[in-house]
């Protein structure tokens, strides 16, 4: 007997929560009236409403990517400050990769990514020269 491939429950519940957040926040961002009530929708055309939903999805996705990026940058900075060369090299490699991906997807600007990469690599080279 062949088992059917089903999505695990926690993934489904996570998707449902994200969709609820998107719909709730999307309504609040483009509504006139009280912050906690839905109010009257400012958007009238169907295409505008669809773009608003898509923009909200992108905003939530980008917010997660930025948070991950900030965490990696902080971890790399602490490894560089502590003077652990091997850990700093590995974290620096991963952080540079993450910066490139974020810049490629438009989460951050390419110049910002290049500046942050340059600073990290410069600190890593100073650490390697002193060690």
Image (tube, rainbow, N blue to C red):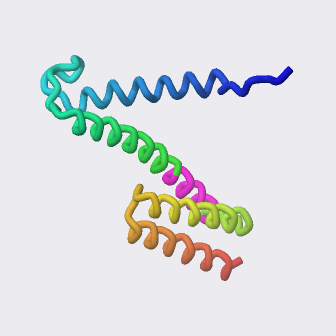
The location of residue 125, given as percent across then percent down, is 62, 79
In the displayed structure, would residue 60 be above or below residue 83? above
Task: Based on the picture, tell me whether residue 74 belongs to the magenta stretch.
Answer: yes
Q: Which residue sits at x=52%, y=65%?
A: 100
The location of residue 105, given as percent across then percent down, is 45, 58
Answer with the quarter of the image where residue 77 lies. Answer: bottom right
Numbered disc total: 0
Identify which residue, 44 or 82, lies in the foreground. Answer: 44
The location of residue 44, given as percent across then percent down, is 15, 31
The location of residue 31, given as percent across then percent down, is 18, 28
In the displayed structure, would residue 49 be above or below residue 130? above
In the displayed structure, would residue 124 be above or below residue 1? below
Answer with the quarter of the image where residue 2 lies. Answer: top right
Q: Residue furthest front?
A: 1
Magenta range = 69-80
Q: Residue furthest top?
A: 37
Horizontally, is 113 left or right of 90 in the view?
A: left
Q: Which residue sits at x=68%, y=68%?
A: 89
Horizontally, is 25 left or right of 76 in the view?
A: left
Considering the image in quadrants, where does the N terminus appear?
A: top right
Q: Which residue sits at x=49%, y=52%?
A: 70
Task: Based on the picture, tell me whether residue 51 belongs to the magenta stretch.
Answer: no
Considering the image in quadrants, where does the C terminus appear?
A: bottom right
Q: Residue furthest bottom?
A: 129
Answer with the quarter of the image where residue 13 lies. Answer: top right
- Decide whether the magenta segment is chiefly helix, strand or loop: helix
Q: Which residue sits at x=30%, y=31%?
A: 26
In the displayed structure, would residue 79 be above or below residue 25? below
């Amino acid at each position: 007997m062949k088992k059917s491939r089903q999505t695990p429950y926690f993934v489904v519940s996570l998707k449902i929560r994200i969709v609820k957040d998107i719909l709730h926040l999307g309504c609040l961002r483009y509504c006139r009236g009280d912050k906690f009530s839905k109010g009257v929708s400012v958007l009238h055309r169907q295409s505008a409403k669809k773009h608003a939903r898509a923009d909200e999805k992108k905003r939530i996705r980008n917010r997660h990517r930025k948070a991950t990026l900030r965490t990696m940058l902080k971890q790399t900075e602490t490894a560089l400050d502590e003077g652990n060369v091997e850990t700093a090299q590995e974290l620096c490699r991963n952080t540079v990769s993450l910066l490139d991906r974020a810049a490629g997807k438009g989460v951050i600007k390419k110049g910002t990514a290049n500046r942050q990469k340059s600073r990290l690599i410069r600190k890593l080279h100073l650490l390697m020269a002193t060690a």
